[in-house]
Amino acid sequence: MPILVSDLANQVQESAHRLGIQKYDIYGASVDETSVQVDQGEPKQVKASQRSSVTVRVWNHEGTLGITSTTDVDPTGLELALKTAYDASFFGMKENVPDFSPEAMAPLAGQEEDRVSPASVSDLIAALIAAEKELLAAHPAIASVPYNGLSQRDMERFYLNSDGAVRRQGQSVASIYLYSKTEQEGKKPRSAGSFEVSRGLEQLDIQKCIRETAEKTISHLDYEKIPTGKYRVVLSPDAFLSLIGAFSNLFNAQNILDRQSLSTPESLGSAIASPLLSLYDDALHPENIGGELFDGEGTPTRRVSLIDQGVLTSFLHSAGTAKRLNAQPTGHANMGAKVTVGSHFYHVLPGVADSAFDLSTADNVVFIDDLHALHAGVQALQGSFSLPFDGWLIRDGQRTSIESATVAGDFRQLLKSIIHIEPELERVGAGLSPRVWIEELSITGE
């Protein structure tokens, strides 16, 4: 049920007046979610949840700030949250105190409503059982689909402050995930997965998810060890954006101010990658299903150029980091116990076709499809990584699955070693990217 944000703003204003609070802001979200899992043609798990979260910030007459969070969005709960935040404000920090975003009342660039009617639980179960059945029938070696899920979410977000800013956004998102596993006598189990997202169940491309999962799984059946050495490497869109995300401190202004970044404030304008690479963060891209119109401080989201032809052009900012670095907020603030900065949706600009870089004719090239253990194998402040991966060794255009291997390197060197970016974009969880060719990376076989 949509939150009447204008009514909420009036209630909060009355409560604040009673408590003697002059300056405050509130960011909140509510989510209705239904998800199903199946196992061998039977429902395994059905979950439905309704959850809300609200973060309240109050500034006292001394200018210091208190923050509290609550799951209670009725007038009594919000008034208690205001009082708690006000009491906490007298113990708040004295330096670099956050303030309202200067763009909290600027116009938004998208639609406030983007909802579809939810499907019934029985329809979700039926669709997922059918997908599992079709995937199991795709090849005799595919024995199970141990991880799967079909979910739909209806979300409402809002922001308001004592200066009169009132924002809201309602949207629907549906997603499916399939991950299949093989069993063959005398061979190791092989597995692969795929993910699709859309506005609702009817728009969800379930067939594409089934097809990609089957093709990837089958392609790993005949595997070989790979000799340890240095190889030319092609990163799938998912693998490349996984690395971008793992080293996102490069662009994160809060990380830079905290000295937890590979960049410094002076890094802007320096060449950090091959001139072939141009990277954006674009929350409003049409392919970004579930994209946010505004961030936790009410700042409108937008397209931000991070790397332009290899040159670092922008950082991602909250209102606070922008003020400290003499920049503009970019709409990347996450509201919580403290304001953090995070990305939305990466977009790597496609390159142009070049017959010298064609996987169908490549020789002695490693194609990395999926990187694992990023939580453990990435040294984000050193710039280094050593990660297990799923992929293929390509000889004379023929793919052979790699049994077990890790890829290692330095992320900054990897960016400068890009020798080709393919022309075809693919949407993955973190954004849009083509396949990216790297001159050389170290591969360690089992």
Image: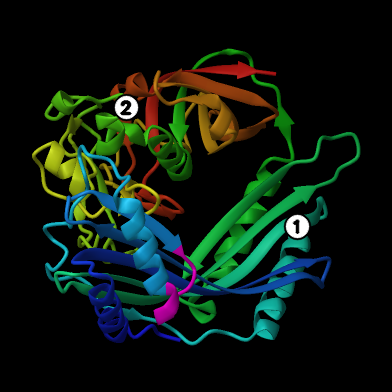
Q: Do the residues labelled 2 and 1 touch (CB within 8 Å)?
A: no
Q: Quadrant of residue 401?
A: top right
Left or right side of 136 for 337: left
For the record, the magenta segment spans: 70-77
The front one of 357 and 36 is 36
Determine whether, in the image, residue 232 is placed left or right of residue 350. Answer: right
Going by the numbered disc 2, the residue's amino acid type is Ser
Residue 50 rendering spot, x and y as whole percentages: 56, 75
Q: Which one is in front, 123 or 337? A: 337
Measured as percent of width and height from the top left, residue 422 is found at 34, 41
163 to 412, vertically: above or below: below
Residue under pointer 2 = 261
Q: Which residue lies furthest to the top in this view?
A: 229
User: How many residues crowd around disc 2 within 10 Å: few (fewer than 14), some, or many (20 or more)?
Assistant: many
Secondary structure of the residue carrying tag 1 is strand
Q: Is residue 364 left or right of residue 141?
A: left
Q: Mark 1 points at which residue?
A: 145
